[in-house]
Image (tube, rainbow, N blue to C red):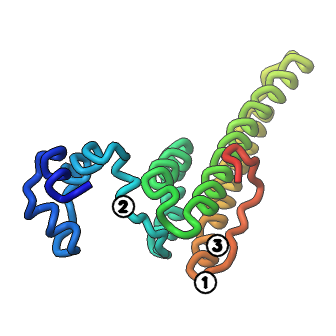
Amino acid sequence: MSQEGLTENSGLSLRTIQRIENGETEPTADTLKRIAKALNVTPNELVDWAIVEDKGFLKALNLSALTFLFFPLLGILVPLIMWISKKDKLKDINRIGKDVINFEITWTIIFSLGFVCNAIYMTYTLKSTGVVSMSNIISGMRFNMFFLIFMYLFNLVSIIFNTFLIDKEKEVRYFPKIKFLGK
């Protein structure tokens, strides 16, 4: 297609088309959409999306899982949003993003199951003895507190450890993790 034809089909000026073609200017999002529509392609097909390295973003993605400290589901949602925003555009983003999210989902499941199992155990103990004793209640509360502290520290240490691995350009090692998001 000639520049004149592209001008006519896109509604852009000939000078705008020439500047973009000669590399004198970067097209705006609206300009890209118009050119893509005129050429009957998607805007992504027009842009050369070179995969770049951004170790800072990878570390930020990893550290974003620390939002679990405020609410466990945030440890999944915040990294998920960050991963989706840069998916396939940064080197190692898919591998690290999936590992972090898979770990956080697994951690959240184990965290929840720990409290459910303790509640079932306490209910069973109460029914089998038939007596509500303060020692049983305190024992259950101690277990919950120990479990909560252990799980939070484990998650915190895992995230910080893996942030150092990213900084040293080494493979992240999240364990345990169930692969909810495939490779």
Disc 3 residue crowd, few under 14, some 14–19, many 20+, Cα 10 Å:
some
Counting from the top left corner in percent of width and height, residue 77 is at: 50, 45
Q: Residue at x 75, y 44 (%)?
A: 143
In the rendered view, tell whether residue 77 sits above or below residue 156: above
The quarter of the rendered structure image containing the C terminus is bottom right
Q: Residue at x 51, y 64 (%)?
A: 63
The quarter of the rendered structure image containing the N terminus is bottom left
Identity, as a three-letter code, of the amino acid under mark 3: Phe
Disc 1 residue crowd, few under 14, some 14–19, many 20+, Cα 10 Å:
few
Residue on which the image places disc 3: 161
Discs 2/1, front: 2
The reply to whether residue 138 is visible in this rendering is no
Q: Secondary structure at mark 3?
A: helix
| Viewer-closest of 68 and 1 | 1
Upstream in the sequence, badge 2 or badge 1? 2
Counting from the top left corner in percent of width and height, residue 23 is at: 22, 74
Q: Residue at x 20, y 61 (%)?
A: 27
Identity, as a three-letter code, of the amino acid under mark 1: Lys
| Left or right position of 166 against 144 | left
Q: Residue at x 67, y 46 (%)?
A: 181
Identity, as a three-letter code, of the amino acid under mark 2: Val
Location of residue 121 by image quarter: top right
Upstream in the sequence, badge 2 or badge 3? 2
Q: Secondary structure at mark 1?
A: loop
Residue on which the image places disc 2: 47
CA–CA distance in space, label 1 to label 3: 11 Å
Residue on which the image places disc 1: 168
| Left or right position of 150 against 70 | right
In contact (CB < 8 Å): disc 2 and disc 3: no
Location of residue 118 by image quarter: top right
Upstream in the sequence, badge 1 or badge 3? 3
Counting from the top left corner in percent of width and height, residue 14 is at: 9, 59
